[in-house]
Image (spheres, helix red, strand yellow):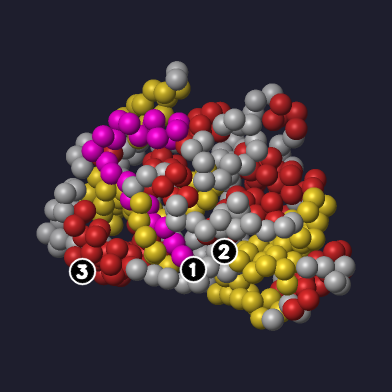
Amino acid sequence: MEIWVPYGDVESLLTLQAENLGELVDPAPEGHAEELAQMLKERVKGFERLVVCDGKPATLKLLRALAPHLPQDGTVKLNAPSPKSVEEGVPAIKGRVTKLSPPSVVVRVEGAEVKLPPELTQGRNLVLATGEPDPLFGYSDARVAAALSYMPGARRLAYEAREGDAPAFLKETKAYATIASLLENARGSSYVTVITKGGEAFSMIDGGAKDAAGHFFPQTLNPAKGIVVGAGGRGYDDTFSRLLRLATGTLGAVRKGGDILLIGECREGIGSEALQMQAQGRISEANIRRGFYADGMEETAYLSRLKDDYSVTLLSSLPDLYASGRFRFRAAKSAGEALQKVFSSAGRGAKLHVFTRASETLLA
């Protein structure tokens, strides 16, 4: 059987014998960008600024459908953390997207301080992002995207508010509540999160994890000897950090000690500061016990779980020095090579569950 798994801007072909395939979780594309753009067009009318927090494919496709309806007189300003990536994806708004001012407005939460751009505390802002399940926040929505994009120190406060290192998906976590509290000063802002299906803009929500959960079809799977996990392609597997966060939500589908094949291009490298430090040998258990922090510190716990409890093969563009050297994974540069390594470990008769888009997967 031929299975196409998103890999960056392209797809990787997995060829599995029928006897080796357990369950295939492959969300069928269903897009409603034009209908959603009509809804968003009405929403934008009441705001002075549209803040686009990511460059994920669904966000850009929705913006392309929305672009003809945006006022041309500048009454609605367009902002993004990375204007270039948004303009490249939506040529119709080229030259109109700018960054927000540097963070300068101080917000105090439980004795800690963070800053946010003055524009977020002034005027009326519509904040847009594509959501995804997240082990720390439960669901990474437009609120999370705005805080992490524009509020230095927000991730650390969320990390310190967590209830242990166990991942929590599609639940209202304390880390998420902390993020929401940081944005209370942005009273003129409204948040719209795009929900995807098969990588397409499928629907929109205003709420967090609780609202998002209703758009996911819970999968109940008996743990298999192995699983194959794709994050969802560009926007989801740009870094190893993002691939790791999303893959963590599928671990209930594999037996402890089983095999995991992670598929993600990781064209932008490792990702979070904490994982980069770990890959370079600049962080230790002693550091962590002493309360040392680097952005993405929670990911060191996710990585440790993978290494301690499973046998992992990584199909990516990461250098072998990191993949097999520092992370102690088996590294592969093709799908055929990756499957060969999985079956040499799990056995030729092993069944594998396959998740093509962990960004759209919820295990019951």
Q: Give residue 317's position: percent from left, percent from top.
A: 66, 65
| Residue holding disc 2 | 357
Q: Which residues are magenta?
A: 177-197
Q: In this image, 354 relative to 113: left or right? A: right
Asked if disc 1 and disc 2 are in contact, CB closer than 8 Å, the reply is yes
Q: Give residue 349's position: percent from left, percent from top.
A: 85, 71
Q: Residue furthest bottom?
A: 1
Q: Amino acid at mark 3?
A: Pro
Report how many numbered discs are placed on residues in the image: 3
User: Image quarter for residue 6?
Assistant: bottom right
Q: In this image, 101 relative to 313: left or right? A: left
Q: Residues within 10 Å of mark 2 (few under 14, many from 20)?
A: many
Magenta-drawn stretch contains 180: yes
Magenta-drawn stretch contains 346: no
Residue 14 visible in the shown view: yes
Q: Amino acid at mark 2?
A: Arg
Residue 8 visible in the shown view: no
Separation (CA) of disc 2 from disc 3: 31 Å
Label 2 secondary element: loop
| Residue holding disc 1 | 198
Label 3 secondary element: helix
| Residue holding disc 3 | 68
Q: In this image, 240 relative to 46: left or right? A: right
